[in-house]
């Protein structure tokens, strides 16, 4: 397994374009950022989530963050690629609730192909090509224009239901009320957390808190706790020399089998494969 090692070339955004002559694609890999690839010529196939996504000239594919995928590319395919961390471009985003945003969006669409002859496809393609032009011409204030186009892409994804704008579903009052619970989970995920203690933080009956959380997110609060634990376990596997067992215990798991099952469900691969993908290099 390998990772497509891409270094951001403009403030946490990676942009590249051109022919892929001589390459037949990339092996299985993943990345923390969402990836947008507009195909201008040739043919591009993304293999992810047990499916093949064909992308023809004039079409764009979005590959979601942390989705293991490989690609097959016809010779002389021409494409433009933009990788961005969507969480950084959320309206009203706060670092403290980035887990919630990722949690709500993780299973929305592993991949999404913007097919030809659609207004949304044309708008997404136009914005990506604008980003490419601004980057390649390197004129004054090009980063401002690039970020503006990315905000428009994110807004279009929200408006068309491709990613979830949780701020449109969660009133600020509800979010403010839940914030102490979210922060408590962030700070205490390494140990056992009960519904009773979470309810006590904001003086709510545990069952009522559970209903509120599920009503807002569509999922139960223990799924969220599990997500935060796996989110942090991923970092340990990549940034430290901990064994998988040590990373599991450090992230709040007492059962390695349950950790492996949870990891596979959220990340699409085992912890061992994830580490190999993220720490290997493609030259």
Image: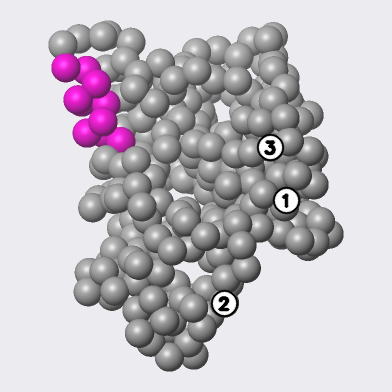
Query: Percent from the top left, x then y, of residue 199?
Result: 43, 82
Left or right: 79 as drawn, with respect to 68? left
First reached walking from the N terminus: tag 2 or tag 3: 2
Give the quarter of the image for residue 136.
top left
Q: Which of 2 and 212 is in front in this view?
A: 212
Report whether residue 72 is seen.
Answer: no
Magenta run includes residue 148: yes
Q: Mark 2 points at which residue?
A: 194
Q: Which residue is drawn at 40% across and 16% down?
A: 9
Q: Is the magenta stretch mostly helix, strand or loop?
A: helix
Query: Which quadrant would the C terminus be assigned to in this image?
Result: top right
Residue at which label 3 appears:
237
Which type of secondary structure does the marked residue at label 3 adopt?
Answer: helix
Q: How far apart are marks 2 and 3 (CA)?
A: 26 Å
Q: Quadrant of residue 273?
A: top right
Is 28 left or right of 166, judged from the image as shown? right
Alpha-carbon span between mark 1 and mark 2: 19 Å
* Count of numbered labels shown in the rendering: 3
In the picture shown, does residue 224 fall above or below 71? Answer: below
Residue 254 image point, x, y percent: 76, 61
Q: Residue at x 37, y 56 (%)?
A: 97
Is residue 192 placed above or below 86 in the rendered structure?
below
Q: Do the residues labelled 3 and 1 touch (CB within 8 Å)?
A: no
């Amino acid at each position: 397994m390998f990772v497509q090692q891409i270094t951001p070339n403009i403030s946490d955004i990676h942009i590249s374009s051109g022919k892929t002559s001589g390459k037949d694609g990339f092996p299985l890999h993943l990345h923390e950022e969402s990836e947008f690839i507009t195909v201008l010529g040739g043919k591009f196939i993304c293999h992810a989530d047990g499916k093949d996504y064909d992308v023809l000239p004039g079409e764009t594919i979005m590959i979601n963050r942390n989705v293991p995928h490989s690609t097959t590319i016809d010779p002389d395919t021409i494409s433009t690629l933009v990788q961005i961390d969507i969480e950084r471009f959320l309206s009203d985003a706060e670092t403290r609730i980035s887990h919630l945003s990722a949690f709500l969006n993780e299973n929305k669409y592993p991949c999404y192909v913007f097919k030809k002859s659609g207004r949304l496809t044309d708008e997404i393609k136009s914005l990506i090509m604008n980003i490419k032009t601004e980057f390649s011409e390197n004129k004054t204030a090009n980063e401002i224009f690039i970020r503006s186009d990315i905000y428009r892409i994110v807004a279009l994804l929200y408006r068309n239901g491709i990613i979830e704008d949780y701020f449109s579903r969660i009133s600020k009052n509800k979010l403010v009320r839940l914030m102490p619970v979210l922060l408590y989970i962030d700070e205490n995920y390494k140990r056992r957390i009960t519904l009773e203690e979470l309810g006590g933080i904001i003086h709510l009956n545990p069952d009522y808190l559970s209903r509120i959380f599920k009503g807002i997110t569509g999922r139960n609060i223990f799924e969220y706790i599990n997500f935060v634990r796996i989110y942090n376990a991923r970092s340990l596997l990549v940034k430290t020399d901990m064994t998988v067992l040590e990373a599991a215990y450090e992230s709040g798991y007492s059962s390695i089998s349950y950790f492996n099952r949870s990891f596979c469900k959220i990340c699409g691969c085992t912890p061992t494969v994830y580490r190999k993908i993220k720490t290997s290099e493609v030259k």
